[in-house]
Image: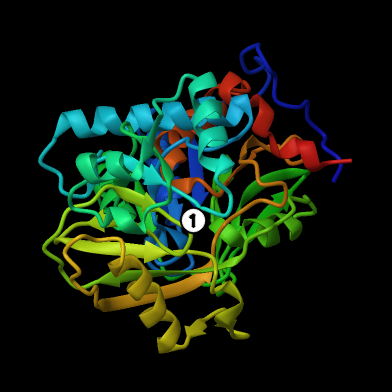
């Protein structure tokens, strides 16, 4: 799509001839969309948060939401994630009694068939200044007595600064603040598309054909982002796979966030756990209407693997499970900020929606309100896919 306006500046403020947006519409009711909408309202804009269904009924409602920057990633991506964790620590400090945001640390191991993997991961994290500790099985037994150390690999990587967040609780918290700031929330709009006029984003059109107008539009609808943007002629490759998250019945045991060869799990409010992995992706069946089904045997096997990680031997019992597309851009890197080919339009699309939710809210809102590229987002511009 050809633009009739100058691209977003990387350093200078909005051109004096450009209208400062006074109204904004954010499409997407998950953690990213709600965070961005709250930040825009804080900046004094008239904001509408619009979503096809209910708040948090997509990927944010079935995310492991592990707050981390572990493993290997680009320096820019690592920096953004570290800033993301910092914002959660600020939120936690404001009210440590919240049971939906905690920092118990993380523990990772892989199969003993790849004994060098833990050491390489640990050394890479240390090189980036990430708090990382290499543990033997005996170390795991001493440091995490609530875990079954025999299930661990010969070497594990512990990251004490990591945490988790329950995104449904976060979204509810942010939505409450958004409303208190005067923001509006429109739900159950069905499949929406961008309205483009004179080469600019001018709003959205909902499933009933009703148009919702705004000076700036932010598209933050998870795995549906690529399709929405394609409808406006902007390519953003999508690599979103299927995934499933299981929430358990209450279990009387504490644990850090665990990432192991057959189960990833974290604590959850109400003494429950959330559990997922990727070994069963080909056993998730997606239907034409976008709904997904999973055989009960898959859930049973996943929870058996998770139960084996706990020292109590207490079997974890499924309370509910949800499946759908996990948002991941085609190149694996976040897509955040202004769309040069479509003035007035901004995108927030990333695999790490939990870790980045608060910092993405700040930085994308900065681009909307100032007309300048935020330095932290320069590597993640949607424009990297255009011609």
User: Residue 105 at what x, y percent from top left?
Assistant: 29, 39
Residue 4 seen in render: yes
Q: Tell me if residue 125 comes above or below residue 200 in the rendering.
A: above
Q: Secondary structure at mark 1?
A: loop
Image check: 223 left or right of 96? right
Q: Residue at x 21, y 49 (%)?
A: 100
Q: Tell me if residue 109 comes above or below residue 269 in the rendering.
A: above
Quarter holding the C terminus? top right
**Front residue of this view, candidates 126 and 153:** 153
Give the quarter of the image for residue 124: top right
Image check: 263 left or right of 235? left
User: Residue 241 at what x, y percent from top left?
Assistant: 61, 65
Q: Residue furthest top?
A: 12
Q: Residue furthest right?
A: 387
User: Residue 314 at what x, y percent from top left?
Assistant: 18, 71
**Front residue of this view, candidates 379 and 151:** 151
Q: Residue at x 24, y 61 (%)?
A: 310
Mark 1 sits on what residue?
A: 28
**Front residue of this view, candidates 286 and 362:** 286
Crowding near pointer 1: few (<14 within 10 Å), some, many (20+)? many
Q: Tell me if residue 89 comes above or below residue 10 in the rendering.
A: below
Residue 178 seen in render: no
Image check: 318 left or right of 229? left
Image check: 277 left or right of 138? right
Q: Give the tally of numbered discs.
A: 1
């Amino acid at each position: 799509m050809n633009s009739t306006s100058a691209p977003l500046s990387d350093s200078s403020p909005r051109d004096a001839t450009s209208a400062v947006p006074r109204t904004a519409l954010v499409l997407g009711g998950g953690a990213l969309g709600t965070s961005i909408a709250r930040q825009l309202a804080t900046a004094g804009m008239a904001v509408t948060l619009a979503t096809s269904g209910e708040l948090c009924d997509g990927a944010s409602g079935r995310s492991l939401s592990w707050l981390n920057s572990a493993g290997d990633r680009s320096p820019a991506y690592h920096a953004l994630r570290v800033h993301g964790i910092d914002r959660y620590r600020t939120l936690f400090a404001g009210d440590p009694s919240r049971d939906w945001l905690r920092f118990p640390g993380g523990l990772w191991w892989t199969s003993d068939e790849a004994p060098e993997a833990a050491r390489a991961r640990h050394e890479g994290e240390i090189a980036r200044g990430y708090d990382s500790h290499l543990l033997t099985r005996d170390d795991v037994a001493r440091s995490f007595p609530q875990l079954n150390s025999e299930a661990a690999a010969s070497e594990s990587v512990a990251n004490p600064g990591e945490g988790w967040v329950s995104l449904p609780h976060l979204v509810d918290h942010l939505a409450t603040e958004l409303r208190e700031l005067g923001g509006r929330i429109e739900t159950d709009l069905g499949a929406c598309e961008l309205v483009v006029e004179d080469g600019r984003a001018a709003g959205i059109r909902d499933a009933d054909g009703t148009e919702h107008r705004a000076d700036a539009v932010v598209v933050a609808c998870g795995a549906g982002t690529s399709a929405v943007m394609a409808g406006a002629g902007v390519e953003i490759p999508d690599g979103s796979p299927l995934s499933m998250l299981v929430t358990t019945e209450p279990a009387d045991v504490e644990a850090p966030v665990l990432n192991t060869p057959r189960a990833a799990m974290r604590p959850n409010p109400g003494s429950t756990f959330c559990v997922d992995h990727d070994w069963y992706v080909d056993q998730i069946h997606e239907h034409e209407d976008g709904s997904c089904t999973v055989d009960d045997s898959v859930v049973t096997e996943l929870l058996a693997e998770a139960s084996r990680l706990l020292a109590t031997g207490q079997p974890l019992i499924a309370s509910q499970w949800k499946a759908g597309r996990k948002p991941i851009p085609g190149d694996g890197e976040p897509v955040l900020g202004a769309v040069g080919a479509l003035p007035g339009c901004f995108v927030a699309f990333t695999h790490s929606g939990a870790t980045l939710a608060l910092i993405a809210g700040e930085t994308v809102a900065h681009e909307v309100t100032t007309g300048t590229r935020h330095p932290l987002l320069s590597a993640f511009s949607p424009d990297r896919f255009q011609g």
